[in-house]
Amino acid sequence: MRGGKSYAPSQNRMPSVSVIIPTHRRPHLLRRAVESARAAGESVEVVVVDDASADETARVCRKLAGIKYVRLERNQGVAGARNVGILASSADYVAFLDDDDLRLPGSLDLQREALAADQRAGFACGAMLMSDQSYRPTGEVFAPSHPGGDAFWELLELEFPVMPLSTLIRRECFLRVGLLGRHLSGIDDWDIFVRIAEHYPVLVTARPVGLYRRPTPSSGQGSSAQAAQLRRVARHQLQLLRLPRAQAAPAGRRRAARGRALNRLADTLLWNAAWQVPRKEFGFACANILAALRLNPLRAARPGAYRKLLASLLAERGAGRDEGSASSGEGISGE
């Protein structure tokens, strides 16, 4: 393969699903991700794309029996690595799995059967279980907010949250709409889902299909820099509004889609800020507030939008006082 090298195990039969795992300098996470992909379905082809890692990733991959390994000599980014994985894969259905996330057992079979039963659908998506950085479930469930079917406008307006971990895509979709945009760092998945939904219905399965390792401001995950990522979303939506289906709609429909997206982005940024204040991630919170004000000043400047922030700050101060009192009390009683 141009720009890299690959090796693959011999196959006695064609796989039913190809799972693309792009990775860069996180070899300690790979085995768990690969094992989860294998447990997610029968006859699964696992394609690990090493995005020019300068560590022991290649050595770790050589010890993972049964995978198709592709190494890139120059870093292509997540979207570029996913594209290489698609081209190196061979199944009729394609799933993306980040190296720090996990597929749940049987989930690929569930979604493949749903797509096989509805030949019109482009991809199937399901719920995800949230976990902390140590893969401990938090009890939160991230589920699609759409019943399925025509989801183009909801995806375009950010009203239908869906992520690569939760989806299985029919391979022919890439032949019709093209591959992922390498220049769309962090939002290449949203872009491809919108472009697929322009032409294909979407299926929604109720059962959770993956375990998503929630990012933190310091985790180094692509989605940990959310303020910059959501600014890119706002800019790129203007390009997606030029898709033929959007252009065929009345101008008022496009304006409404733009307004709803900007409202959702501002609300998400302010919620992110409020969520991180109790965790003392004040720099992250400020970056999100400033991004909300830049993207949608009228929405972000509403007094009600800051009540949750104030409540978080007061709760944090109260917790600090309680801890201080407890510490003082322990010291006195120990004397």
Image (cartoon, rainbow, N blue to C red):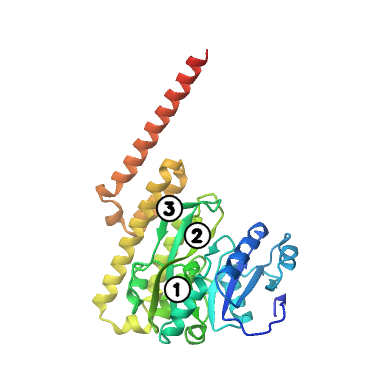
Name the residue tied to disc 2.
212
Q: Is residue 326 left or right of residue 24?
A: left
- Residue occupying image coordinates x 46% and y 20%: 328
Q: Nearer the viewer, residue 267 or 295?
A: 267
Looking at the image, is mark 3 or mark 2 nearer the viewer?
Answer: 3
Q: Secondary structure at mark 3?
A: strand
Distance between the Cα atoms at labels 3 and 1? 29 Å
Q: Give whichever of discs 1 and 2 has the lower sequence position.
A: 1
Whether residue 56 is visible: yes
Residue 309 coordinates in the image, percent (x, y): 34, 44
Q: What's the CA distance linking mark 1 and mark 2?
A: 20 Å
Q: What is the x, y in percent for residue 177?
A: 47, 84
Label 1: few (<14), some (14–19) or many (≥20) C-alpha neighbours in 10 Å: many
Q: Which residue is mark 3?
A: 139
Q: Nearer the viewer, residue 123 or 153?
A: 123
Quarter of the rendering containing residue 7 = bottom right
Examine the rendering and report whether any part of residue 182 can be seen.
Answer: no
SS of the residue under disc 1: helix
Label drawn at residue 202: none
Q: Residue at x 31, y 45 (%)?
A: 308
In this rendering, which labeled residue sits more in front, label 1 or label 2? Answer: 2
Q: Residue furthest top?
A: 335
The residue that disc 1 covers is 191
